[in-house]
Amino acid sequence: MIPNTLTIAGVDPSGGAGILADIKTMSALGAYGTAVVAALTAQNTRTVAAISPIPPEFVVAQIDTLFADVRIDAVKIGMLGQKLVTRAVADRLAHWKPAHLVLDPVMVAKSGDHLLERAAVNEMRDSLLPLATMLTPNLPEAGVLLGSSAVETVREMRRVAEKLRRLLDDRGERWIFLKGGHLPGNDTIDILHDGDRMIELPGRRIETANTHGTGCTLSAALAALLPQVNDAPEAARRAKAYLVAAIARSGELSVGTGHGPVQHFHAWWPAPANKL
């Protein structure tokens, strides 16, 4: 059965991040993507020029109307922007109880622009984190969630993963996917931890400016794969492999002059003979 997946996130008009990137990823990985718009942005590959919030009651209406009709097998949460929207999303997902809930704690864009109100960080920690079945922070985001500075070694990452795991509910299987892309050097080691197993996912840095939306893409890939694989470590390995290939093939695209998008359809589109 083809899984139905849902992204609750913001809209990036350039298509490299947010809902548009999530739908591309889910489609590429064999899932049917649906979406609830939680925020609007005026954004390109260089900057976030403006953010327009969505009224919390309308976010609730989108979620409830969708779940009332469509079987949702996995949910990915990205940019929510505001405290009240974060609270509303947590309330409705606590009601609908999706089997898989991947939480990407989006706080800052690649351009450096802030995407989450400071007041919303505590709301996310208190109401959304306990619901997540997989949390996917990068190292700076992990530092914000824990109220500590970002770490710079794999040994420190393991301790951070343990601390983050304590923030999640203990009912059922819960995972931390701590992303090591901000580590110094050429290694990009990620840590997967469920409170018992501590699994390292090795990787090597790819020299490219096309890293816009990598966090969105990874979390959407996890949401697409978890219902199909039903094994979190294997889904994580496949999601990372998909993202690495998407980054490696990103040079085939010519989108913007800043941090360009990854090539979500690298497995489907032939490499162009010549760039436009």
Image (cartoon, rainbow, N blue to C red):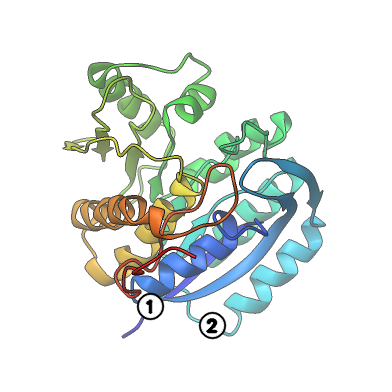
The amino acid on which the numbered mark 1 sits, given as a three-letter code, is: Pro
Q: Position of residue 213 (x, y in %)?
A: 50, 49
Query: Which mark identifies residue 70?
Result: 2
Query: Which mark identifies residue 3?
Result: 1
Q: Quadrant of residue 113?
A: top right
Q: Position of residue 205 (x, y in %)?
A: 28, 35
Q: Is residue 21 left or right of residue 2?
A: right
**Which secondary structure, mark 2?**
loop
Q: Is residue 73 visible?
A: no
Please tell me which residue lies in front, 207 or 43. Answer: 207
Tell me which label, 1 or 2, sits earlier in the chain: 1
Please tell me which residue lies in front, 275 or 131. Answer: 275
Q: Quadrant of residue 69?
A: bottom right
User: Is residue 47 shown above or below 9?
Assistant: above
The amino acid on which the numbered mark 2 sits, given as a three-letter code, is: Val
Q: Position of residue 176 (x, y in %)?
A: 34, 39
Query: Which mark identifies residue 183?
Result: none
Please tell me which residue lies in front, 84 or 81. Answer: 81
Identify the residue at image location x=39%, y=30%.
164
Q: Is residue 52 left or right of residue 184?
A: right
Q: Position of residue 254 (x, y in %)?
A: 51, 57
Q: Quadrant of the N terminus?
A: bottom left
Q: Residue furthest top?
A: 149
Please tell me which residue lies in front, 179 or 49. Answer: 49
Q: Which of pointers 1 and 2 indicates the residue nearer the eye? A: 1
How many marks the image carries: the answer is 2
